Image (spheres, helix red, strand yellow):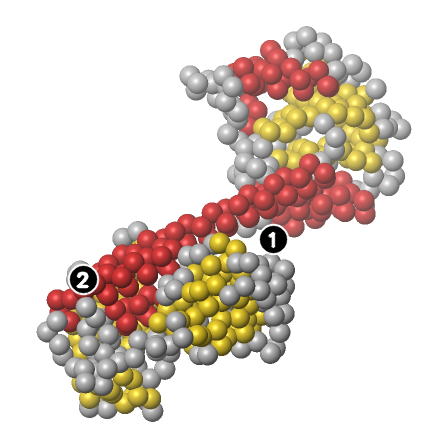
Amino acid sequence: MSDWQLELVGGPALPERLLPIGDALLIGRSAECRLLLPDASVSRLHARIDRHSKGYSVTDLGSRGGSFINDEQLPANQAMSLREHDRLRIGPFRFRLRRIEPAPDSLGGSVRAAGATIVAQPLLAAERRLELLVEFAASSSQAADRHALALLLVDYARRGCTALGASLRTLPDGAVWAQSPAEGIPSPGLEALDAARQGGVVPGVLDIEGLKLPTLSVLLKVDKTPTGLLQLVFERPDPRQRVEAPELLHALTRLAGLSLGNLERIAAEGRMRQLQADLEQAREVQKRIAPPPAGQVGPLRYGFHLHPGAVVAGDLVDLFAVADGRIAVVMGDVAGHGVGAGYLMGSTQAFLHAALGETRDLAQAVTRCNRYVARVGGGRFVTAWIALHDPKDGSWQVIDAGHSHAVLWQRSVVGKLPLSGTFPLGVDPWAEFRAERWRLPPGGRLLLYSDGVVEHRAPDQREFGVSGIAEALMVSQSPAEDVALLTAALDRHGHGVPPNDDATFLSITIS
């Protein structure tokens, strides 16, 4: 009776992918097991495979997680017969039972290379090649990762074409991806690559210390993109190789390309899910560091709305009291939107918090922040409206750093603020900023907004504009009403389509 072996086809990597069973094979987490599976879901003594007169059987040794043959759980402590190609699952590990095929001496030969003797076998019969192809299709579809799939491909290619050795090189760098056997037969170089790009299976010769061995090379493609070069080395020229081997190699590489493409898509989907989760976390952080949508800081009563153009916003709104009792008001707009803009927004907000807490001089704090943005912004800039309100005398110190989107709402009239303004933060790292003085008149409201508000377009491409703000707020009596009415007006203007840029609106009045 021929010997059998277990082939690892899925799950965590193990030191050996192929393990002869012999007369008995104890499987588990204990060091006394010949097949050691280091996973918490595997029992210390999990299962045992035994040889008997009619073949092999497997027994689950009362394990916690159970043992499965072809996805059916085995009863505990009861020997169950095994057949070739049965699939054994223990914890996260998946194995396939396969027969070790001895090479007949009358038909085979051997080549000694690098201190090892590799036995060559005759070409497999057509039925066996078809069977092997079906096996590979099943195994490759369950490969855990790219490396496991590459090992499967070279192993099946070598066995299916009865080659001395098979290797797979990555493209375009040409690094050896996988080899079968792992040692003994050198891997051919990339000389056949250009010919393989033209299509077909390319014959060649590998010179090993004067011994010239025939080779075959074929491209592995994923979605029509060359990903690897599969190469086989044979003992001697055989006319059947040129007819039978290419057909099998084409089928194997097509199946491998499909499985590899699926693995890459699964990996990409995983990365996308992780990115989405990271973005959602970033969005939650933004919500926590922003002030509540409506409230009061000292005598300043406010309401604001922020609609991010992406998951993470590049607009900045902040109101907070500094140590001397003054109140800081910040509206900012980072150039662009998305993750990069969101990161710069958060770091600018943190810097302004620290700078305004350290100095009473608004100009000095903004000048320092400008240098910071220029250093970390990566070419981005920040338009900002930054002010300090002193409740003691009602005065405002204001720096309009290229923002300009600030108006006074008083008696149903929108008016410009009498501020000169300057260029945005991050444009000139050595710029010196100067604060201007201003007062919010009684009954008036300070309206700050980002360009995403006024540039929001209707289906006919009409922009919302400052006139849209004035029309929306015609009957409003408070900052909270301002926010509600403006949000509804933006929705009507876009016919339900939200702004494609960050759109932020802040209304402030003095109680």
Callout 2 amino acid? Glu
Which numbered tag is attached to residue 442?
A: none
> Which one is in front, 127 or 349?
127
**What type is the residue that disc 1 sits on?**
Arg
Q: Which of 254 and 376 is in front in this view?
A: 254
Residue 322 visible within the image? yes
Select label 2 or label 1 by which is in front.
2
Q: How crowded is mark 1: few (under 14 residues within 10 Å), some or many (20 or more)?
A: few
Q: Can you identify the residue that label 2 sits on?
A: 247
Q: In this view, does 201 lie to the left or right of 70?
A: left
Q: Where, by quadrant of the figure, is residue 412 drawn? A: top right
Give the spatial CA distance, label 2 vs label 1. 60 Å
Badge 1 is on which residue?
Answer: 375
Residue 456: % across, % down: 51, 23
Pointer 2 or 1: first along the chain:
2
Location of residue 345 in the rendering, given as x and y in whole percent from the top left corner: 63, 42
* Residue 110 location, quadrant: bottom left
The residue at 89%/28% (across/down) is 392
Horizontal and vertical percent for residue 115? 34, 91
Task: Identify which residue, 441 or 509, lies in the foreground.
Answer: 509
Looking at the rendered structure, the secondary structure element under dot 2 is helix
